Image (cartoon, rainbow, N blue to C red):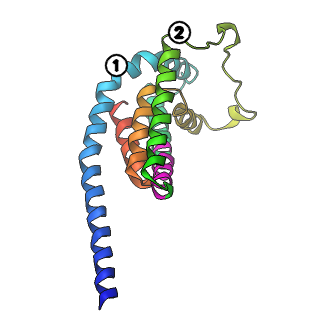
Amino acid sequence: AGRRAAGNGLRRLRLLAARAACRMIELTVPVLFATGLAASPHCGLMCAPLQASVLRLHRDMPMRRALLLLHAGRVTGYAALGAASGLLGWWLLASAPSVVWGRALQIAAALLLVAIGLRQLGLGPTRSPSRCRPPAPPPGFARIPQSLRLFLLGMAWAAMPCGLLYAVLALSAMSGSAEFGAVLLAAFGLGSA
């Protein structure tokens, strides 16, 4: 009887944890969509020149369709990053041997953010602009159908460095779930589209 009670208690605890996670996601998804909306001016200023150059290369396609494909790829890329981040968060939460280990991760993340901030202020090592060149497209990329090529370019957009994206990825890692992480990043991506 004791084992059965303990098993029932454990099942109940897991059910409560799952319900709490669902409530967090229910509340967080609209907030991240709103965060994406609020971030739109930043996104527009940072990415508009690159987006314009990509769209200029695809002038023979209607603008709305090109934008839809590009942003569909971007949101898909964000969702994939969110899934990876949620999975990493699950692994970190499951494998953290102690609270001290968790605090060490928090401190490391905070120091990384400070280092990024210092570099943004010009107080860290910088690269010479003459060495910054866009990479050449992979061999055969021009043979890919134009619609798929735009979608893939949108997915690659998720790899662009972005402080706002990093913050949302940290939140998705805290969800501890690949599914929830994907939903959270997709909401952010849709809001910023």
Mark carried by residue 41: 1
Q: Nearer the viewer, residue 17 or 162?
A: 17
- Label 2: state its secondary structure: loop
Q: Position of residue 161 (x, y in %)?
A: 52, 26
In percent of the image, x 68 and y 16: which residue is there? 133
Asked whether residue 176 is drawn in magenta, I would say no
Q: Is residue 64 visible?
A: no
Three-letter amino acid code at the position of disc 1: Pro
Secondary structure that dominates the magenta span: helix
In percent of the image, x 48 and y 48: which residue is there? 101
Mark carried by residue 14: none
Q: Position of residue 185 (x, y in %)?
A: 40, 41
Camera-nearest label, 2 or 1: 2
Q: Is residue 27 above or below residue 116?
A: below
Mark carried by residue 122: 2
**Mark 1 nearby-residue class (10 Å; few <14, some 14–19, many ≥20):** few
Q: Position of residue 191 (x, y in %)?
A: 32, 34
Three-letter amino acid code at the position of disc 2: Gly
In percent of the image, x 54 and y 24: which residue is there? 60
Quadrant housing residue 164: top left
Judged from this view, the residue extending furthest toward the bottom is: 1
Q: Is residue 3 above or below residue 116?
A: below
Magenta highlight range: 81-94
Q: Quadrant of the image for the C terminus? A: top left
Say left or right for 133 vs 99.
right
Q: Along the polypeptide, which appears first: circle 2 or circle 1?
A: 1
Judged from this view, the residue extending furthest toward the right is: 139
